[in-house]
Amino acid sequence: MDINELKERVKWLIKARLYVVCILTIVGIIQTLVLTPEKYLELLRPVSFLVLIILLCDFLYFIILKKQRWTLKSLTAFTYIQIAFDIAIVTALIHFSGGIESSYFIVYLFLIFATGMLLYPISTYVIATLSAISYGLLLLFEHYGIITTIIIFDFQLEIWKPGVILATLVFRAGSFYITAFFSDHISHVLEKKTQDLEKTSHLKELFISILAHDLKNMLQLVLGHAQLARGSKNMEHVKKIEETVKRMDRIIDNVKLYSKLREKEYKEKFERKNLYEIIKRSVGIFEGKREIEIRCRDKNCFVEASSTLENVFYNLIDNAVKYSENKIEIIFEDEVKNWKICVKDYGKGIPDELKDIIFERFEKKEARTGLGLAIVKQIVTLHKGEVWIEDNPEGGSIFCVSLPKT
């Protein structure tokens, strides 16, 4: 949760107090119909005073929230202070409205539920515990006469017996934790739904971006070469069309794979495979485009791999081919527990400020999706490995992948 999201939630908490005040007012009106005028006046004064305190505090919270410059830590502390004070006010309200006889303990349930919905889910149990302690201490102090018991309803005195007090405390404290549990559960469900919506929105933006930029640009290339090839015996334009269509097909495959890898539920079947053979197949795709040298002492490099692992080395070699005019080297290193594979190119290299973010999907000026390296990162993580970039001392970059041996 970032600072802006928490600030919006705190605003909702402030608004929610106003709704509580409205509810308390309605309850007060109902009680005028039930209680005698003398009892009602006895209840009205303290309850009205506490409601006024809630309104004043709420106004003060809003001013402080608006004027103060917050960090995430300070805003979280400010929120908990509000809720702790709310618990104190509710406890006082229960005391002045009959103690154990009061029905205002329900306001505790509202606080617990609101905390779970607006703040961190774990907070619900903290607030439930504070509410149970506050309510328990109130009943204990009233029972032993530490604070004066205010009797509003004409119930029998048997209600103040220790057994009844204990049973009431257990029952109501239990309701606090039940509310906390359901609030926590609902909060997690809503959070998951929100994440799913964000993921769907992200993929939707991705598809629109690719359709609007990359594929559109490639269609223009195809159209241009098709017009040049019309009435011409030069097959070069036909070859360019074929290459562009293949690139478009590859982009579509990358989008489909990327969307699957973004799903947490994505599962792949892992089998014992020879890493050397996987890389050799990827190199074969680029035969004739660049000189690619594989340096490997032991060709029995076995790992637990899925069918997606070949995409890692295809994308790394494809990246090297696009940005390096010279030869490309693929170097195997035995690191006892892992196989380290380095794809070494002699291109322009990658600036230091981009090395940490290059494996995330981002826009480029060229007609590219930026998905290749993002897919590499996702697949390597799926295989419990690591991927990083080093500078080539001779100029260029070295993309390194470390995968655990079988």
Image: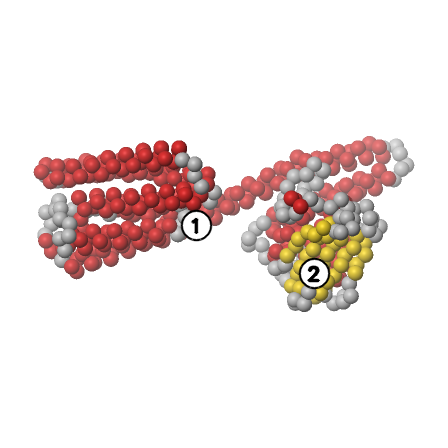
Q: Residue at coordinates 69% horizontally, 55% vertically from top-left? A: 400
- Is 160 on the left or on the right of 224, as rendered? left
Could you give the CA–CA distance between mark 2 and mark 1, rounded to whole angstroms?
A: 40 Å
Badge 2 crowding class, 10 Å Cα cut-off, few under 14, some 14 to 19, many 20 or more, is many
Residue type indicated by callout 1: His
Please, which residue is most extreme toward the right here? 233
Q: Residue at coordinates 72% horizontally, 38% vertically from top-left? A: 366
Picture coordinates of residue 403 (x, y %)?
66, 61
Give the answer, above or below, for where 43 lies relative to 308.
above
Q: Which residue is mark 2?
A: 340
The disc label shown at residue 188, or none: 1
The disc label shown at residue 366, or none: none
Q: Which one is closest to the eye, mark 2 or mark 1?
A: 2
Can you say which quadrant of the picture contains the C terminus?
Answer: bottom right
Of the residues under marks 2 and 1, which one precedes in the sequence? 1
Q: Is residue 314 visible?
A: no
Circle 1 sits in a helix, a strand or a loop, which is it? helix
Q: Quadrant of residue 163?
A: bottom left
Which of the two residues, 15 or 242, is positioned nearer the viewer here? Answer: 15
- Is 308 on the left or on the right of 78, as rendered? right
Q: Residue at coordinates 33% horizontally, 48% vertically from top-left? A: 112
Q: Residue at coordinates 86% horizontally, 39% vertically from top-left? A: 236
